[in-house]
Image (tube, rainbow, N blue to C red):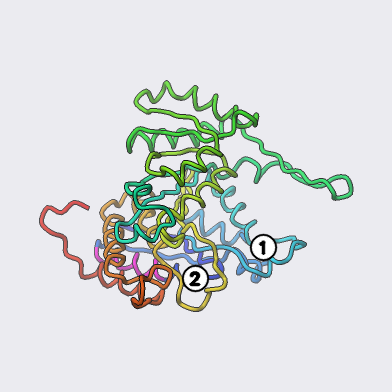
Amino acid sequence: MQLKIALLAGDGIGPEVIDQAVKVCDAIANKFKHDIQWMPALTGAAAIDAFGEPYPEKTHEICVSSDAVLFGAIGHPRFDNDPSAKVRPEQGLLKMRQKLGLFANVRPTFTFPSLIDKSPLKRERIEGTDLVFLRELTGGIYFGERGRKNGGNTAFDTCTYTREEIQRLAKKGFELAMARTKKLCCVDKANVLESSRLWRETVQAMEKDYPEVEVTYEFVDAVAMRLVQWPNSYDVLITENLFGDILTDEASVISGSMGLMPSASVGTKIGLYEPIHGSFPQAAGKDIANPLATVLSAAMMFEMSFGLQKEGALIRKIVDQSLSEGIVTEDLVKGDAKAYKTSEVGDYLASKIEIYKSSPGEVF
């Protein structure tokens, strides 16, 4: 199969973790007889330095001509520490989502048996956790009217949603719930916000089209509490942009490290796959960053953009093997065990894929 993939390494540790994902993808392609055409492009601070903007038209053209986008991370301290900066790396991410029509962020949270005690939560609270957030990406307060008034002493940001924006996100949520345990939770603040009331009434109107799905409605503050009390009680959750941004970061640490969780941003055509962590500039260039979230994002890419389920499943199997054998970076090391470099973990994963032989009748 021919696979045309845009490669956006981005900033900070982005290039390092992307390099490991490429190793793994190339090993998968070799094993399953695929042909990957990698198409590198700049975004974030790297693109600002080269082109003066964080998501240049050249990068966009490469993305739209590809079958999928594999993305690293965006962000640089020189912009974080300058409140007056007119152009910021993160603006490239928002622009990319909008121009590519990536309206749904798919953020799974699950646990690894070998790392269950790395979680900040008690074992009995998190065992069996396997949930997915669908966060709306191109509407809400991040894209609403904003500004200053009263001589700059008053600031405002406006949260605006249309029924159509809610319907298309909720549709993906219902479809995902049908493929899983048929449980869907709509997260809002309908007791206070008019935009949340539109969310709730829109989803309620869609229930009749999915009679097998059990739908619940919870306020965002209640979900924030339950995520640290009983995360394994959730399956599929849908919510708006700001709430989803906050709750998915909260959920991400359940596994024990932000360096473990993958994500996908999808719309009607192309999909973008990225780790949930940021650019972690303090670790950039040190070969210590955890590449597993990026590698698992590549697994999601094989499955969701190309329908290659065996390929994605094999990547996850080998990642599980690396964790159980302790071939991990310093953030996951137990006791006095050896910490492996980012590149060493990538080499291990690729080599294990290349020599892997499935058992008769094995189903990934």
Q: Residue at x 66, y 42 (%)?
A: 141
Residue that badge 2 annotates: 15
User: Alpha carbon of mark 1 to alpha carbon of mark 2: how far?
Assistant: 19 Å
Instruction: Name the spot of residue 205 as percent of width and height, x first.
Output: 49, 22
Q: Nearer the viewer, residue 101 or 284?
A: 284
Residue that badge 1 annotates: 53
Label 2 is placed on what type of residue? Pro
The secondary element bearing badge 2 is classed as: helix
Tell me the crowding category of disc 1: few under 14, some 14 to 19, or many 20 or more residues within 10 angstroms, Cα based. Answer: some
Residue 25 is covered by the magenta coloring: yes
The main secondary structure of the magenta stretch is: helix
- Image height of 244 relative to 273, above or below: above
Residue 223 is covered by the magenta coloring: no
Point out the tag, 1 or 2, that comes first from the N-terminus: 2
Tell me the crowding category of disc 2: few under 14, some 14 to 19, or many 20 or more residues within 10 angstroms, Cα based. Answer: many
Label 1 is placed on what type of residue? Glu
Q: Residue at x 15, y 54 (%)?
A: 362
| Magenta range | 20-31
Q: Nearer the viewer, residue 59 or 85?
A: 85
- Image height of 16 relative to 67, above or below: below
Instruction: Name the spot of residue 259 as percent of width and height, x first.
Output: 44, 62
Q: Residue furthest left?
A: 360
